[in-house]
Amino acid sequence: MFFLSELEHSLRLPPHLLNQPLDKAIKGELESLFLDTVIDKLGLCISVYDIRSIDGGFIFPGHGASTYTVKFRLVMFRPFLGEVISARLKESTTSGLRLSLGFFDDIYVYVPLLPAPNDYAPDPSRKDGVIWSWNYHADPLTIDWTDEIRFKVHSVNYHPIPVEQGDDDDPEKKDSKPFAPMVVIGSIDDDGLGPVSWW
């Protein structure tokens, strides 16, 4: 689920940070650039693990900042296919479930990846929400909001940043989901998966 990834980056260090120790100032700038950012095929950056090397310190003409070439390692969240992870229910709709790990909310379990036979009923406590249930030997086992849910990673998808920006006046675009650069698709259609209370 968590990996170390080594990167190299050319970093401009603003002059107001030059009174700090170099490695501390560079780590702070790296954190502001990379923390909570999805890097294509690497995953979601959780923290700057360490700085391997700092080279340069050149001041280019017309710039008031020194430029460094930095090699560093990041702790990345990138689940692998088939990994079993525990999460909490964030949203339940007719298209399936949306789960959350607390720091990452773009986990979806679509209807074909729910245990069959399944059914849903309107959730009286949530607008447009539903309560999913698995009809196991005529006993409906519901997916409750308080349950811890185990899911198996079915796929991890990276989406390019959209070129067109949404129009705030367009009612169709107001209701669309916000852009997610990394989406995890999960499955709970297997033994031991789904709400912990089922097992």
Image (cartoon, grey):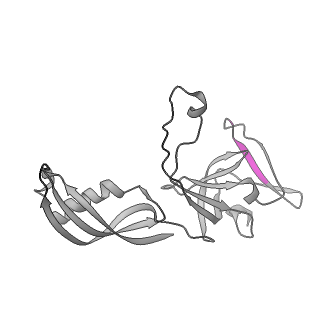
Given residues 155 and 46, the one toward you in this image is 155
Q: Residue furthest right?
A: 138
Q: Which residues are magenta?
A: 128-133
Q: Position of residue 160 (x, y in %)?
A: 50, 52
Given residues 155 and 111, the one toward you in this image is 155
Residue visible at 31% across and 58% down in the picture: 31
Locate the C terminus and report the quarter of the image it occupies: bottom right
Given residues 188 and 155, the one toward you in this image is 155
Q: Name above or below for residue 180 compared with residue 84.
A: above
Q: Please say whether residue 21 is visible from this viewpoint.
A: no
Q: Residue furthest top?
A: 169
Given residues 135 and 182, the one toward you in this image is 182
Q: Would you say 184 lies left or right of 130 here?
A: left
Q: Position of residue 180 (x, y in %)?
A: 52, 50
Q: Position of residue 120 (x, y in %)?
A: 79, 47
Residue visible at 75% across and 70% down in the picture: 191
Q: Quadrant of residue 48?
A: bottom left
